[in-house]
Amino acid sequence: MRFYTAFALAAGAAAQHSKSPLPSSPGGAVPAGVRPPSTSGFDNATIQPARGGLAVCVSGTVSVKASTSQNLKFNFELPKNQSQVTNVFLRLFSNPSPFAQELVSGTQSASGTYEIGATLCTPANNTTPDQVQLLTHGIGFDRYYWDFAPGYSYVDVAAQYGHATFLYDRLGVGKSTKADPLNVVQAAIEVEIAKVLAQKLRAGAFSNHAFSTVVGAGHSFGSIITQAVTSQYPEAIDAAILTGFSTNSTGTVPFNLAYSQAIASQNQPYRFGALNNGYLVDGGAIANEICFFRAPGFDPEILSLAEATKSTVTLGELFSISAVTKPAANWTKPVAVVNGNEDLAFCFGNCSAPVNKAEAVFPVLYPQAKTTGAYLAKNTGHGLNLHYSAVEAYHYIQDFIDRSVR
């Protein structure tokens, strides 16, 4: 399926769900007469349409001051070559693994003012909603996971429902600060950054508009970060959407070994040549497909684009990824879990057996939640947004938000 065909399907489906369909104008400049968001709060700002033209966006960098005392301290030195990187993960996932048991030696503080690559999008009908969705991407992607290509844009479908979106590059990714990949770029500080961004959206720090409602939505590691916000700072957001997420860890080892972590500066010297050996990427297109895709539910061109635009992950993130997940005991607001049914990382390839692993999240992590939703997309792997099924999943999410968030 070519991009323009996928876009036509997406636009048609969106029109069926929208109360007031927006005109579609994929690519190019912002159409005449359409007012983009203000550039206030963004440095080096640019204006552009979303991939399908259903939203207008301002992009740039924003400053975020964040600190934590919960970053992990490791008994570890950065690897000197690719062989050492590979051996790290073979040792980490051996059973039993003395390396894993001896890796962490306590906690340490991390703080700073970080430049974060960010994009704020509003519907292309000259409206500025009072609700915004804070979108946190996962490992292997940057913020454009949420606005990937015409027909694969979460941002465009959200705009159909009159929803604004704020997508950003996690610390160490894309246009965001490339901090120490072992001691700084970890899960705990990224939770703090997400919390501060939610607060800034409420306070009107971006585009001179204070949003009264902030919905946190994540994918994979981005869902881990979002879930941690609901646990540690439940007042920061009004609802949570967790995609590519569960409490099942059986797929962790095959996912990480299949990912074939490669030193980013060697694998992609043109893009990442300035980074040290603590920044990694997937080993290649086959690794990307195994970890994120499931045939026949995707267009091979989308896999090629995902590999060409793949983003970095740090050793600090991979070592700390499970450290921030805790039950959100006081969370009573809406929460939904949306997965590809064949997700490898969080379902070991089957999210519906022996139980629905999306639904299984709620009694474990959200025992007090009054409104929950679960959705499994068929023929879909871990990279939900990159499959033919993505648009219908987007509609499920936007419908859930419209029904549940007041």
Image (cartoon, helix red, strand yellow):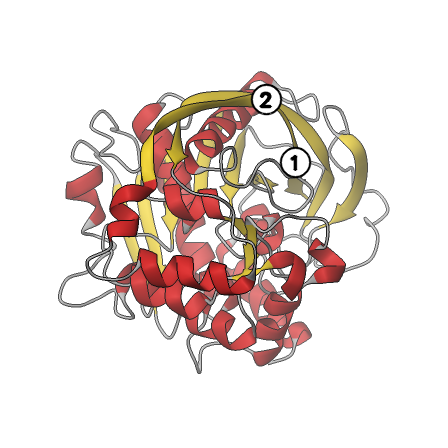
Q: Nearer the viewer, residue 387 or 89?
A: 89
Does residue 377 lie above or below 106 as drawn?
Answer: below
Amino acid bearing label 2: Gly
The residue at the far top in this view is 203
- Left or right side of 165 for 119: right
First reached walking from the N terminus: tag 1 or tag 2: 2
Residue linked to disc 2? 112
Task: Please report the residue visible at 64 percent of the width from the left and 65 percent of the height from the top.
Answer: 267
- The answer to whether the residue labelled 1 contacts the one labelled 2, judged by CB atoms less than 8 Å apart, is yes
- Left or right side of 365 for 194: right
Q: Nearer the viewer, residue 58 or 18?
A: 58
Residue 218 visible within the image = no
Q: Where does the image place residue 370, in percent across and percent down from the top left? A: 21, 34
Amino acid bearing label 1: Thr
Q: Nearer the viewer, residue 162 or 90?
A: 90
Q: Residues within 10 Å of mark 1 (few under 14, many from 20)?
A: some
Residue linked to disc 1? 177
Image quarter where the N terminus lies is bottom right
Q: Where does the image place residue 112, in percent across and percent down from the top left? A: 59, 22
Task: Please report the residue visible at 45 percent of the width from the left and 64 percent of the height from the top.
Answer: 86
Residue 270 visible within the image = yes
